[in-house]
Image: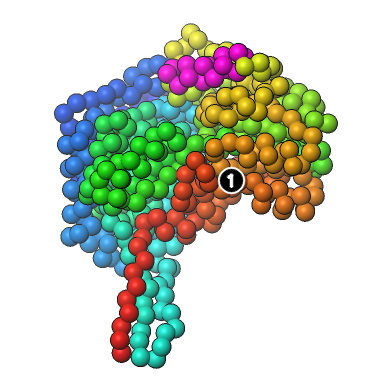
Amino acid sequence: MDLTHDDWKRRAATLRFHGSHLIDGRSHEGNGTFTVVSPRDGRALADVADAGATEVDLAVAAARRAFDEGPWPRLAPAERGRTLLRLADLIEQRRTDLALTVSLEMGKLVTDAYHIELRALIATFRWYGELAGKLTDESPHTAPEALALVTREPTGVVGAIVPWNFPLTLAGWKVAPALAAGCTVVLKPSEKSPLSALLLARLATEAGLPPGVLNVVAGDGPVAGRALGLHPGVDVLAFTGSTAVGRHYLRYAADSNLKRVWLELGGKSPNIILPDAPDLEQAAATAAWGVFFNQGEMCTAPSRLLVHSSIAERVTEAVVERARALRVGDPLDPASEMGALAGHDHLDRVLGHVRAAVDDGARLRTGGQPLQTGTGGAYLRPTVFDRVAPDTALAREEVFGPVLSVLTFDDLDEAVALANATDYGLAAGLWTSDLSTAHRVSRALRAGTVWVNCYEEGDLTVPFGGMKQSGNGRDKSAHALEKYTELKTTWIRL
């Protein structure tokens, strides 16, 4: 894939979108529509069917029939895996269109969508497709007069609700293991980014997924998401999004059928740089890349840079220089290094955090202003604050944008205390050359993932998820199957 800016724009001009739900293997229009607007230039991309309680009920009913009566849960696991592998091949064939759709609907660089998001999606379906036929049950040793069997069985109907920042990657992290386990799924993408999910659903049908096994309904959280959360026909709900919305889904479970709820929520991830970091320039470069990648719209973004006071100015200045040099522009331009935020409403929220930080006494080192204001798009200069007080909103609240707060410390205990002084516990970074320090601090950090001398690295073999108010359960790895299976004990008297 080596397309120019003009190539991508020509493809965008001819791309046609699916705007209807996919329910029971068929397109479903529903009773209303909403318009998806591209944050790239403010233009309307498509009118999409708007799901209400009726459409959600139809989708759940289809998923329930497919689970209770259909072939999918009863197939040999290896056969389910072969279907997922066929889907991975179809995604590869449509990779360019899927990447372009993601870029247009949520603003990320099309090159990142192609090389990172779609690579992750394809790898996810292939990994779980290959894993499906390799899982084994247990037969514990018991007394001679009995036989015990411990089996993992698919839980049933899964409601999956995913956000707009990685619309396909996060959908894959939930859909692929759920399908591999033998569950059926109702997927609700964000109303900002439904087009890529609707295309994915049609590719799944083409791959041979039986009707009702994967249903996709588009709509907003307060209506469609609420209906899915409250639905008594849903056995498991898997959600990625904000902590505030995650609380609603726990309440929906309590108010309905006590469905299991798995949450991957917000983050305010610390990135600790010690004076003995193996390469301070690399540490600073990675800190800048991590917080500005995907426009900072990442729950794992290292948005709190904690730097030892002896190196603070050197590291901060290096990050500021990189922020100033970063080329913000059209997501379809391969020369751009940062794209558009997800919309003007989100841009306004991020700017609100910037204003509040200034009012709280933080020093604005660079950025903080909108860019490309004549394009109709939602662009923001990469932003860096230092002299950030630990008790201020910028140090504690998730901004979900390209805004970095720099805090300093004088000793290791203070660094760990600062890192853990948040309600979140999703991820953390640590830069040191001392092996003992790496182990001790990693254990002390209350985070689901700790990166040492790197950031945002890993593969599908390792689990991903949070502690504290960053959620529960794990995506990725074989551990993700724990969310979509029930353990059954069978005790047989011989």
- How far from the left and from the top, in percent, is residue 328? 58, 20
In the image, taking residue 273 as reference, residue 36 lies left or right, namely left
- SS assignment at label 1: loop
Between residue 114 and residue 450, name the one nearer to us: 450
Kind of residue sitting beneath label 1: Ala
Front one among 189 and 20: 189
Residue in view at x 76 percent, y 50 percent: 437
Left or right, residue 365 beside residue 214: right
Describe residue 409's horizontal placement relative to residue 128 as left or right: right
Q: Which residue shows up at 70% across the image and 22% down it?
A: 386
Residue 492 appears anywhere in the view:
yes
The part of the image, by quadrant, that contains residue 424 is: top right
Q: In the rendered view, tell whether residue 133 sits above or below residue 303.
A: below
Quarter of the image containing the C terminus? bottom left
Q: Where is residue 280 in the image (x, y as percent from the top left)?
A: 78, 36
Q: Can residue 335 be seen in this view?
A: no
Q: Residue at x 18, y 48 (%)?
A: 61
- Residue position marked by numbered label 1 in the rendering: 447
Relative image position of residue 277 (x, y in whole percent): 79, 41
Q: Most prominent secondary structure in the magenta stretch?
A: helix
Q: Does the magenta stretch include residue 150?
A: no
The spot of residue 305 in percent (x, y) is 68, 32
Q: How crowded is mark 1: few (under 14 residues within 10 Å), some or many (20 or more)?
A: many
Q: How many marks?
A: 1
Whether residue 196 is situated above or below residue 362 in the rendered picture: below
Residue 350 forms part of the magenta stretch: yes
Q: Which residue range is magenta in the image?
A: 344-359
How does the figure colour the protein chain or chains? rainbow
Residue at image position (55%, 54%) is 462
Q: Please, is residue 327 above or below residue 226 in the view?
A: above
Rendered position, 147 above or below 419: below
